[in-house]
Amino acid sequence: MPAVARLDPKDVFTPEEWASLSRRSSWLGLVCVAGAWGVIFGAGAMFVLWPNPLTYILAVMLIGARQLGLAILMHDAAHGALHANAKINDWVGEWLCAAPVGARLKSYREYHLTHHRFTEQPEDPDLALSAPFPISRKSLWRKIARDLTGQTFLKQRTAQLFGGRKPGEVLNGSNGRFLLANALLFAGCIAAGYWWAYPALWIAPMATWLPLITRLRNIGEHACVKAKDDPFTHARTTLANPIERLFIAPYWVHFHAEHHAFMHVPCYRLERMHRMLMDKGYWSRMKIAPGYAAVLQEAAPA
């Protein structure tokens, strides 16, 4: 099938507006990456200083959300939007974002741009993520249980190590880069005198909370979205509240309809673009959910 229709930014924004939205910063993307790692280390330190079940659960959720955040920032790098310098964009996206969570920027970029080119069409490599919906609530709970008990993680890692890949996984990449990045993290924990922090505060979030919120992200973006010729209909925007943004949807990932309409706009400008589009009346052409509870209600109604 032919590639999906694209919007000309000049038909929506003034030249000045578009210049401000599409500009790649030399520092905002780096601040986002540093912020992700800051939360990861900060949440780990919180549990080390105040070890109890509550701080552990909180640390797992915060770290898992920032592991997803690294994948989101890798996604920005795949669009060339993380940094104004292409070499810095790709190095940071590869080594500080992709490798620690088991992805590879180059292969992800090729895969993901195909998703944008053929969104919700048979050639879309992510179609399998949205095609089954709506599903039953029992089916959704079974998937959530598999995520939180590590079954999804084990299945994905087995596929990564021994071949095969499921649509939408952030795990499509070089085993060598993943092993090297994680060896450095483990070595850092050993050097700090907390060897157990690597399995407890890096692998455990990756095996539990990360698969769950990755699933929620995928459902929020395309499940039950009836994509039409209008590029504003190719994805859903979810109006995540501050708690959802902290634990489920970091780095403006929930503004997905805006991203699909103008895929090269940096993530840190998506919220501003959303407000501009609302002011211009484009809300009537977009699928917008009031939160992730509403998304799940539509994706698993009974």
Image (cartoon, rainbow, N blue to C red):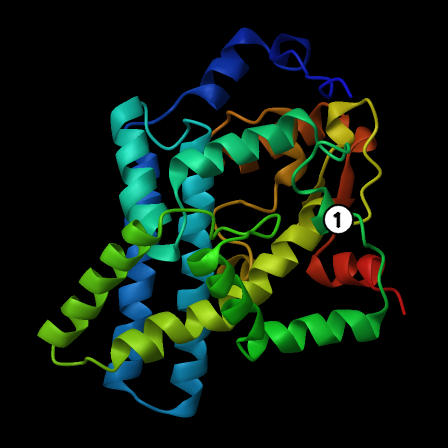
SS at mark 1? helix
Foreground of the two, 205 or 105: 105
Above/below status of 95 relative to 153: above
Going 65% across and 78% down the picture, which residue do you hit? 145
137 displayed left or right of 278 = right
Quadrant of the image occupied by residue 80: top left
Q: Is residue 229 visible?
A: yes
Where is residue 222? Give x, y as percent: 72, 45
Q: Which percent across, then down, holds residue 12?
A: 67, 15
Q: Is residue 243 left or right of residue 109?
A: right
Residue 186 occupies quadrant:
bottom left
Residue at which label 1 appears: 130
Q: Residues within 10 Å of mark 1 (few under 14, many from 20)?
A: some
Above or below for 49 versus 295: below
Task: Name, please, the residue furthest toward the front.
Answer: 162
Q: Amino acid at mark 1?
A: Ser
Count of numbered tags: 1
Q: Is residue 272 visible?
A: no
Residue furthest right as drawn:
302
